[in-house]
Image (tube, helix red, strand yellow):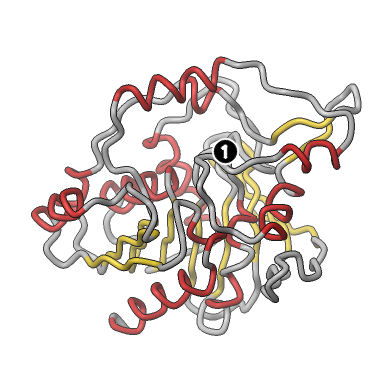
Amino acid sequence: MASHLNTDASTDRSGDGIQPAPSTSGFVEAGGLRLHYLDYGTAGRPAMLCVHGGAAHAHWFDFVASGFSADYHVRALDWRGHGDSEWSQSPDYSHERFASDLTEVADKLDLRDFVLIGHSMGGMAALVYAATYPGRVGKLIVADTTLHMEEHRIAAMREVGARQGSNYATHEAFVARYRLRPEGTTAAPGIIRHVAEHAARQIGDGSWRHKFDRNIYLQRVSVDGLPYWSRIGIPALLVKGDRSPRITPQIFAGVKARCPHAELAEVPHSDHHITLDNPSGFVQAVQAFLARHG
């Protein structure tokens, strides 16, 4: 069962006229944990589920949701260990675990033949889910995902996971120090502030910490995403930022060799954090793909 709580509809945060979409908060049980999601409304329309990357949260999609809500019932999930979802006590944060969580979330929200959008780590988990549980997803969008991560990058992430992390005396102090990783974002300062405001939680001593379980990085292992593409029979789109190095021509050629119908779209003026860097460009790329496939 899913439960709902109202969240505030924020005012313009971006500085360039783009406003975050209003939403309600819901919770659903999956994998023995209480997972949080945002519901952007428009019930009764075809379903769209958005899943974020590592160390992020569901509000990463606040600036693109309104671009899809005229045609879709849009929701965005907080993965376990992220945002307002519970943390795994095991801990278990493999891509297979995330995919299994998605199965339960889809069942309990009655998502059928839905559009699945995954960014970064969420793109890999979405790919694993669509390949492992065929027949559930109708269209797949994988946004600026590293399909094969080198061992030195894995080691660097584990080092981050091993660090204690910082406590901040006030919420504003956390927001002021917040930075997107990797660097290189083209997002407007107001958009970065918006996601920063939703990235902190207050703990027992009154200080503020990042809403992210560092065990997710500590447990990170190298996963080769290319073989999963041979099992994708649905319309599929890869989206990359024009300044991002993650989906190279060689990587896309590897995808096409396994999934000939896969498509690629490049979003201008954006790096890795596409939904923040160029929200309207991301929406246009995805809308064009969805229009081509009915």
Q: Residues within 10 Å of mark 1 (few under 14, many from 20)?
A: many
Q: Nearer the viewer, residue 145 or 41?
A: 145
Amino acid tagged 1: Ala
Q: Nearer the viewer, residue 115 or 143?
A: 143
Picture coordinates of residue 204, whole percent (x, y):
87, 24
Image quadrant where residue 172 sits: top right
Q: Residue at x 50, y 62 (%)?
A: 49
When the figure is inspected, residue 104 is found, relative to residue 90, above or below; the finding is below
Quick check: 127 left or right of 185?
Answer: left
Q: Residue at x 86, y 27 (%)?
A: 207
Picture coordinates of residue 150, whole percent (x, y):
28, 29
Picture coordinates of residue 141, whole percent (x, y):
36, 62
Q: Secondary structure at mark 1?
A: loop
Q: Residue at x 70, y 76 (%)?
A: 17
Quick check: 233 left or right of 69?
Answer: left
Q: Nearer the viewer, residue 20 or 35?
A: 20
Mark 1 highlights which residue? 55
